[in-house]
Image (spheres, rainbow, N blue to C red):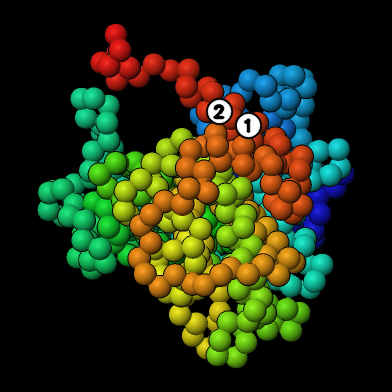
């Protein structure tokens, strides 16, 4: 099997080699179910041959645990002899990463097994979700917003994380939301994050200081290439963590790294355009019925989608307390406490914002589940009911607010399986349950304190 679009890749590689003649190493990377990168580092001379023939990584890498270990009960790995999948470079992804000891070339790769896209590669799952829209000649337009924390690189005596000191004052960061002073005080690391992001072709938007000490949010522009938008969200998370190390800090996208501080969210904005480029969610100066149907679908599939938007044990701590993390099947106009929000539409730019997912969610899978819900709502013409105008604080009893219950709900969802594929849904639930079982095979100091 040959690399697709090899002509485009040849031009891309030639331009890069001319622009960066001193770069000697290449990193080829891909993203697993947990949203973590894996890959290898090569001499850059391998780039030309990889662009023609591809390369090989073990297929099981996509379903390893978050800490890179094989999981019990998963077919892919030891039980199938651990064969390789064929990986191909993704055109348009060649760029420079500049946070290491020297600048390096970087490319993302996507996989095929038995000459078909590997069905459990997260990027391929999102690609499958987009096929329904392509059948109608529709194109989603999406944007991600990611919150993260900066912590001290050193932990305390109990191995717990510490609030990062203000780089300019040396004092603990003061959690004032939208503080321009906080952005200025952390400008060296933030500027470095933006510079490294731009070097990878990631166009960043607004930067804001958030509600937590050491917490910030950086937005991305709206993207017609949904796969590229998710690529950039994943690359951005990696970039923030690597650049933070350079500045003696530790970055985290955990959903709830500190119980007494707000959680980290992954907000997703979605609109859809037709073949003429017209927004199908817009009806002049008001939302089209399709937008309301889309929200109806998001509400209907929300319980089943929770395991994609909150994929690990820590994810569900974010839904405890009042911290702008939605815990009810609600929608509203300009209501940030609702799960699904219609932002103020400027010049007919009607869209829906999904505010449920945590920053620890895999961007490919979080977006795939969101698009599946939107599609289901439009297909079934679902009514979302009336919008909520008041602040929403109560938890919804219909929502699974622990991982195992969420996975059981996902497993039985025909609506999500119809778009994402039943085979993938089943494997995803098994992989997440297996990781939870592995996580539980550890005795914490608190168990001794309480029960010894």
Residue that carries the numbered disc 2 in the rendered image: 435
- Return the x and y of residue 117 as percentages of the image width and height: 79, 46
Please report contact status of discs 2 and 1: CB closer than 8 Å, yes or no.
Answer: yes
SS for dot 2: helix
Q: Is residue 77 left or right of residue 364?
A: right
User: Taking the image as drawn, is residue 293 in sight?
Assistant: yes
Residue shown at 70%/35% (left/top)? Answer: 427
Viewer-proximal residue among 392 and 234: 392
Mark-to-mark CA distance, 2 and 1: 6 Å
Viewer-proximal residue among 61 and 13: 61
Q: Is residue 382 left or right of residue 337?
A: right
Residue that carries the numbered disc 1 in the rendered image: 431
Residue shown at 27%/35% (left/top)? Answer: 161
- Return the x and y of residue 384 as percentages of the image width and height: 58, 68
In the rendered image, the quadrant that contains the C terminus is top left
Query: 274 above or below 71?
Result: below
User: Taking the image as drawn, is residue 231 in sight?
Assistant: no
Residue 443: image quadrant is top left
Residue shown at 71%/19% (left/top)? Answer: 78
Mark 1 neighbour density, 10 Å: few (under 14) some (14–19) many (20 or more)? many
Viewer-proximal residue among 405 and 110: 405
Residue 382: image quadrant is bottom right
Residue shown at 56%/86% (left/top)? Answer: 286
SS for dot 1: helix
């Amino acid at each position: 099997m040959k690399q697709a679009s090899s002509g485009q890749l040849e031009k891309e590689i030639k331009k890069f080699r001319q622009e960066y003649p001193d770069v000697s190493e290449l990193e080829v990377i891909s993203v697993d179910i947990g949203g973590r990168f894996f890959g290898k580092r090569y001499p850059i001379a391998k780039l030309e041959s990889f662009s023609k023939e591809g390369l090989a990584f073990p297929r099981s890498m996509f379903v390893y645990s978050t800490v890179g270990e094989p999981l019990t009960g998963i077919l892919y790995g030891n039980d199938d002899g651990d064969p390789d999948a064929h990986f191909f470079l993704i055109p348009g992804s060649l760029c420079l990463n500049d946070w290491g000891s020297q600048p390096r070339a970087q490319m993302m790769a996507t996989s095929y097994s038995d000459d078909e896209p590997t069905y459990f590669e997260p990027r391929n799952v999102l690609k499958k979700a987009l096929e329904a829209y392509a059948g109608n000649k529709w194109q989603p337009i999406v944007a991600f917003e990611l919150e993260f924390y900066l912590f001290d690189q050193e932990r305390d005596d109990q191995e717990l994380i510490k609030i990062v000191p203000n780089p300019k004052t040396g004092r603990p960061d003061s959690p004032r939301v939208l503080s321009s002073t906080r952005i200025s005080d952390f400008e060296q690391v933030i500027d470095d994050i933006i510079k490294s992001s731009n070097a990878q072709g990631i166009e960043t938007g607004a930067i804001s200081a958030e509600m937590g000490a050491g917490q910030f949010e950086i937005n991305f522009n709206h993207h017609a290439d949904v796969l590229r938008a998710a690529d950039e969200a994943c690359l951005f998370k990696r970039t923030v963590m690597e650049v933070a190390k350079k500045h003696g800090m530790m970055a985290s996208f955990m959903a709830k790294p500190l119980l007494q501080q707000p959680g980290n969210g992954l907000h997703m904005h979605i609109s859809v355009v037709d073949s003429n480029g017209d927004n199908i969610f817009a009806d002049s100066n008001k939302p089209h019925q399709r937008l309301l149907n889309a929200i109806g679908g998001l509400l209907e599939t929300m319980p089943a989608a929770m395991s994609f938007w909150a994929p690990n044990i820590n994810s569900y701590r974010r839904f405890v307390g009042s911290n702008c993390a939605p815990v009810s099947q609600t929608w509203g106009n300009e209501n940030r406490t609702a799960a699904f929000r219609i932002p103020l539409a400027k010049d007919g730019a009607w869209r829906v914002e999904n505010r449920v997912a945590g920053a620890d969610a895999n961007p490919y899978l979080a977006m795939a589940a969101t698009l599946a819900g939107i599609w289901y709502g439009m297909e079934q013409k679902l009514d979302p009911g009336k919008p909520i105008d008041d602040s929403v604080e109560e938890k919804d009893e219909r929502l699974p607010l622990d991982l195992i219950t969420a996975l059981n709900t996902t497993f039985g969802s025909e609506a999500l399986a119809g778009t994402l594929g039943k085979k993938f849904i089943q494997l995803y639930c098994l992989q997440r349950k297996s990781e939870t079982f592995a996580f539980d095979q550890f005795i914490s100091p608190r168990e001794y304190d309480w029960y010894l």
